[in-house]
Image: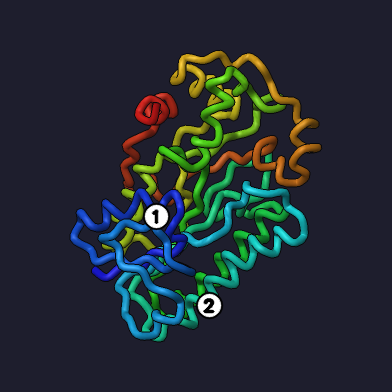
Amino acid sequence: MKVLVTGANGFIASNLYPLLTAAGHETFALVHKHQNAIPRYVQTLHMDDLGEHYFDVVINLAGANIAAKRWTAKRQRELFDSRVQFTRKLFNALKQKPSVLLNASAVGYYGFDEYKTFLEDTPPNGGFTHHLCSAWEQEAHHFEDAGVRTTIFRLGVVLGHGGALAKMEWPFKLGLGGKIGNGKQFFPWIHIHDVCRFILQAMQDEQYQGTYNLVSPQAITQAEFAKAYGKALNRPTVLPTPTVVLEKLLGDMSQLLTKGQHVVPQALMNQKFTFEYQSIDEALKSLT
């Protein structure tokens, strides 16, 4: 199939390219300018080029890194524009709509909660991350209204070589990777290999339609994650990080670390999707 990938220089895309090519698909990356990081076997296109092409599948992974900067009003606008406005421009630029859209979202859609369990149809809480993800998903639904089979996947923390784990590696290696606050906040996670397997499967299987929580079925807390990662690296995890320190350093963005949500991949379990990494210990062992 002809496959277009947005968010083309990102962590998930870079893991996806070799698998798409190995499966025999012709892969295109949507870029803003020339990107040296895109593999040579992937063709690059700009937004203005899209009207000349038809794609069987569009995989929309676009979006500025939500954890890269403090959530000032300017940064919130950038986060919205890179997801919501971008997806609107993508829809308008694709004169011939694809057969399939796979659109990323995040478990931030549900907001943060210490007690509630979130299935795909559980009413969300409010907050910035909910408004961001909800608006992004609404733009994706325009494809569905145009007759495109649309699959939205709400990602937890994706663990792999790079991404969030790369940012955590050195603090943990230095023995500074203890629990955050009381550590009881839920930590929804997924191995990058299972993310890519889901995408490849959803591309071709017409049963994949609608919204999916793309997280491991194993629910863990942040303290349990810290203990497991320390064990995988053979490092201690005894030094906690007080919540107030992160709140002063990061502002509202600290919620990504100090709060969480218990998310269950009910739709995937109903479809008998097999997670190759169901245990956090197995997942971290494979990556360290």
Q: Quadrant of residue 96?
A: bottom left
Residue 33 point in image, percent of width and height:
47, 68
Separation of marks 2 and 1 at Cα, in angstroms: 24 Å
In the picture, the disc for residue 8 is none
> What residue is shown at x 61% (from left), y 54% (from top)?
109
How packed is label 2: few (under 14 Cα within 10 Å), some, or many (20 or more)?
few
Q: Quadrant of residue 79?
A: bottom right
Q: Secondary structure at mark 2?
A: helix
Q: In the figure, 72 relative to 188: above or below? A: below
Residue 191 point in image, percent of width and height:
41, 39
Q: Is residue 78 left or right of residue 4?
A: right
Q: Is residue 179 left or right of residue 54?
A: right
> What residue is shown at x 40% (from left), y 81% (from top)?
49
> Which is in the foreground here, disc 2 or disc 1?
1
> What residue is shown at x 39% (from left), y 85% (from top)?
51
Residue 164 point in image, percent of width and height:
52, 40
Q: Is residue 210 visible?
A: no
Residue that numbered label 2 is attached to: 89
Q: Is residue 160 left or right of residue 222?
A: left
How packed is label 1: few (under 14 Cα within 10 Å), some, or many (20 or more)?
few
First in sequence: mark 2 or mark 1? 1
Residue situated in front as seen by the camera: 263 or 26: 26
Q: Is residue 241 visible?
A: yes
Q: Is residue 127 left or right of residue 162?
A: right
Q: Secondary structure at mark 1?
A: loop
Residue 41 point in image, percent of width and height:
25, 60
Quadrant for the N terminus in the image: bottom left
Quadrant for the C terminus in the image: top left
Residue type highlighted by circle 1: Ala
Residue type highlighted by circle 2: Lys
> What residue is shown at x 48% (from left), y 75% (from top)?
90
Residue that numbered label 1 is attached to: 37
